[in-house]
C-alpha cells in the first residue's frame, strides 16, 4: 500500500525527488507547496521548464547554453576572441563571469575525462575545441578545469592533442589558489578571480 493518499501526489513527488540533491521529504514539501498555489502560478512554473527544454539550445561555437545559435558571449564584439577559457560545464562559465576578471570567450567541454565513469575524450567536446583553435586567431587557451585527478588528466590530454596537431599557442592554467579537489562552481568569486588573473603556463 502506498504511503501517499493520492496516486497523483505520489507521482509528482517521485518526479521532484528525481532531481539532484532532492530527497523524498524535500520533494513532498515542495509538491505540497505547489499544490497550495493558484493554478495559474503552477502552470507558469511548469511552462517555464517546458520552454527551457524546447527553446534553450547550445551555442554552436562554445557549447554554452543560449537562446540563440550564438551565445551572448561569443556574439559580443567586446570580448577578447583571441583567448579561450576551457571549462567543464555551464556552471563554471557562470562562476567565472561572476568574478568580473575575465573578458575572453569560453569552450564548454560538457564533462571531463573519467575512465572510472566511462567518460572518454570522444564523450566530451575536445575535438570541437581542437577544430576551433585550428581555424586560427586564438593566441591563448586557459585550462580552467577542476583541480582533481580527472581534471589534470583532461588538461594533459588537451595539451598533447594541441602538440600533436602542431598548434603553437600559449597554454595556461588557473593558479592553484583553488584548493586541490575543488569544483569551480563552489569556489568563492575572489579566489576564482585571482586564479584567472594569476594563471600560470601549463607544464606537462
Image (cartoon, rainbow, N blue to C red):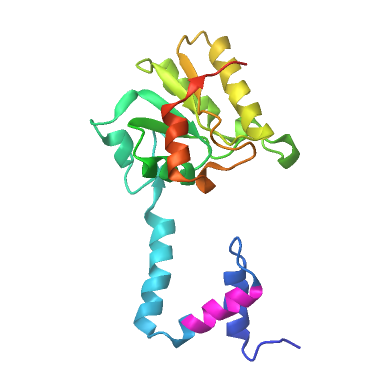
Asked if residue 22 is positioned above or below residue 182 in the image, the reply reads below
Q: Nearer the viewer, residue 60 or 162?
A: 162
Residue drawn at point x = 61 percent, y = 70 percent: 17
Q: Which residues are magenta?
A: 24-33
Instruction: Locate the N terminus by quadrant.
Output: bottom right
Q: Nearer the viewer, residue 6 or 91?
A: 91
Asked if residue 144 is positioned above or below residue 183 in the image, the reply reads above
Residue 6 position in % (x across, y down): 61, 89
- The answer to if 125 sits in the magenta stretch is no
Residue 107 position in % (x across, y down): 45, 32
Asked if residue 33 is positioned above or below residue 86 in the image, the reply reads below
Main secondary structure along the magenta-highlighted residues: helix
Instruction: Locate the C terminus by quadrant.
Output: top right
Residue 127 position in % (x across, y down): 53, 25
- The answer to if 29 sits in the magenta stretch is yes
Please say whether residue 41 is visible from this viewpoint: yes
Amino acid at each position: 500500500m502506498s504511503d501517499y493518499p493520492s496516486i497523483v501526489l505520489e507521482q509528482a513527488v517521485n518526479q521532484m525527488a528525481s532531481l539532484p540533491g532532492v530527497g523524498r521529504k524535500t520533494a513532498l514539501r515542495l509538491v505540497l507547496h505547489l499544490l497550495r498555489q493558484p493554478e495559474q502560478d503552477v502552470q507558469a512554473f511548469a511552462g517555464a521548464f517546458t520552454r527551457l527544454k524546447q527553446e534553450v539550445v547550445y551555442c554552436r561555437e562554445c557549447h554554452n547554453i543560449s537562446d540563440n545559435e550564438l551565445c551572448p558571449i561569443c556574439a559580443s564584439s567586446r570580448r577578447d576572441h583571441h583567448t579561450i577559457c576551457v571549462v567543464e560545464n555551464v556552471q563554471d562559465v557562470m562562476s567565472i563571469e561572476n568574478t568580473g576578471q575575465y573578458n575572453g570567450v569560453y569552450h564548454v567541454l560538457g564533462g571531463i575525462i573519467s575512465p572510472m565513469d566511462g567518460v572518454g575524450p570522444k564523450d566530451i567536446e575536445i575535438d570541437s575545441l581542437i577544430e576551433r583553435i585550428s581555424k586560427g586567431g586564438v593566441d591563448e587557451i586557459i585550462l580552467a578545469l577542476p583541480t582533481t585527478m580527472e581534471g589534470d588528466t583532461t588538461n594533459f590530454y588537451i595539451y598533447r592533442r594541441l602538440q600533436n596537431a602542431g598548434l603553437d599557442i600559449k597554454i595556461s592554467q588557473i593558479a592553484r589558489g583553488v584548493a586541490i579537489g575543488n569544483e569551480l562552481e563552489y569556489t568563492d568569486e575572489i579566489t576564482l578571480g585571482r586564479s584567472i588573473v594569476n594563471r600560470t603556463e601549463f607544464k606537462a
